[in-house]
Amino acid sequence: MVHAVPCTDYSPQSCETALNALADTLDWVRPGMTVGIKANLVHAAAPEAAATTHPALLKALTRMLHQRGARVIIGDSPGGLYTAAYLQRVYHLCGLEDTGAELNLDVSIAQASYPEGKVLKSFPCTGWLNQCDAIINFCKLKTHGMMAMTGAVKNLFGTIPGTIKPEFHFRFPEPMDFADMLVDLQLYWKPRLHLADAVMIMEGNGPTAGTPHFLGLVLASRNPFDLDQVCARLMGLKPEQIPTQQAALARGLVQTPDFPEELLPYCQKDLKLPPAKSTLFRSLLPGKAGVLAGKAIAELISPRPTLVPERCIGCGKCSSLCPAHAIEMKDKKPRIRRRQCIRCFCCQEFCPKGALEAQRPPIARILTH
Ligand code: SF4
Ligand code: SF4
């Protein structure tokens, strides 16, 4: 079941009213519990950029948890460095110092064992969550170059230390494998509650360089797959466009597939979405050779990171972050070796100037017009 309440802005009063309306979803909180809030703190950005979970909502939630006698820790592992100094910078720029919660500075890396996982049976993870009795997954609703959207399911990728994330992209280069990995992470951590900050969402070049867009909701669910399903529909996305939804549906994890009718007025019709992978050629040719040919054509016309040269400042961050070492800096501009690129979109996600966009090549735009 998914609960949704209107929230017109990030004023303290609006945020408190919205979260108070969701108070029943906190009925499991007991005095003395340590609750870890896994926020979306993808990078050091001001709250107005709509890239991170808004501090006013985190503050209102912290207050409610304190009222119930819980200790509250907020944390995440952004992309890149995983050091206390970098975390402090992120907390400062994301406006979290006034939330009333402890801000995690434990950068230990633990080893998780999950033999039941479909693709993730053992993995390194952020150690701070192990001291928590319960986790609340408080995501930010945004577009995403690789996964179409980021909501509850994608948010737990932040439990993989930033320095190790590129290895995961290399280990799971196909979107469906990556999605199965994210589903495994959900089933491993089992957050008690999932909340979505969908007051201001991000459209376009998400998850870090897109444009803020008003939606006006805060959503809650015990089931992250149900929550993402509703969020996707609100954004105008279909489940087949979202690898994590496909992975969850294949495993029977979506429990309430019906969209709440009262949310229909909130559904966005013209949100700028990332280009989808085309499936146009998959079934045109018969037999195994046809499948291979279809796959090759699909690869050729799939979205790829594309430079917008006038925005690039030549900092080289994309090159140093690329897990496939596919980016070479030449004359202070990145050159992407297409054959090496695994289309993880890390470069697009972490470019500080939004100079890389997920775009389909011109031939794809013509063929799929
Ligand atoms: S990270 Fe962005 S700004 Fe920096 S070199 Fe790469 S494309 Fe240019
Ligand atoms: S060039 Fe960008 S999308 Fe391609 S592998 Fe490197 S970081 Fe990923």
Image (tube, rainbow, N blue to C red):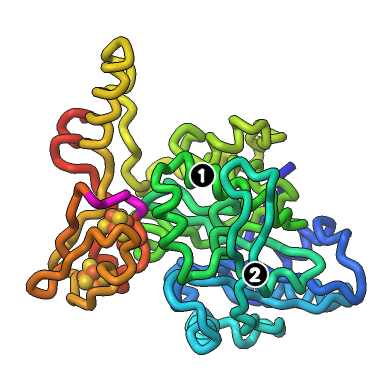
Q: Residue at x 48, y 34 (%)?
A: 238
The location of residue 249, given as percent across then percent down, is 60, 32
Nearest the eye: 47 or 122: 122
The location of residue 158, given as percent across then percent down, is 55, 64
Q: Residues within 10 Å of mark 1 (few under 14, many from 20)?
A: many
The answer to which of marks 2 and 1 sits earlier in the sequence is: 2
The residues colored magenta run: 340-344
Residue 132 in view of the camera: yes
In the rendered image of this protein, does residue 95 appear above or below residue 36? below
Q: Secondary structure at mark 1?
A: helix
The quadrant of the rendered image in which ligand 2 is seen is bottom left
Q: In the image, is residue 59 part of the stretch drawn in magenta?
A: no
Residue 11 in view of the camera: no
The location of residue 176, given as percent across then percent down, is 47, 39
Q: Residue at x 76, y 73 (%)?
A: 131
Mark 1 residue type: Ala
Residue 179 badge: 1
Residue 110 badge: 2
Q: Nearer the viewer, mark 2 or mark 1?
A: 2
Q: Residues within 10 Å of mark 2 (few under 14, many from 20)?
A: some
Q: Secondary structure at mark 2?
A: strand
Q: Residue at x 34, y 56 (%)?
A: 345
> Please, which residue is most extreme toward the top here?
286
The CA span between labels 2 and 1 is 22 Å
Residue 166: quarter of image: bottom left
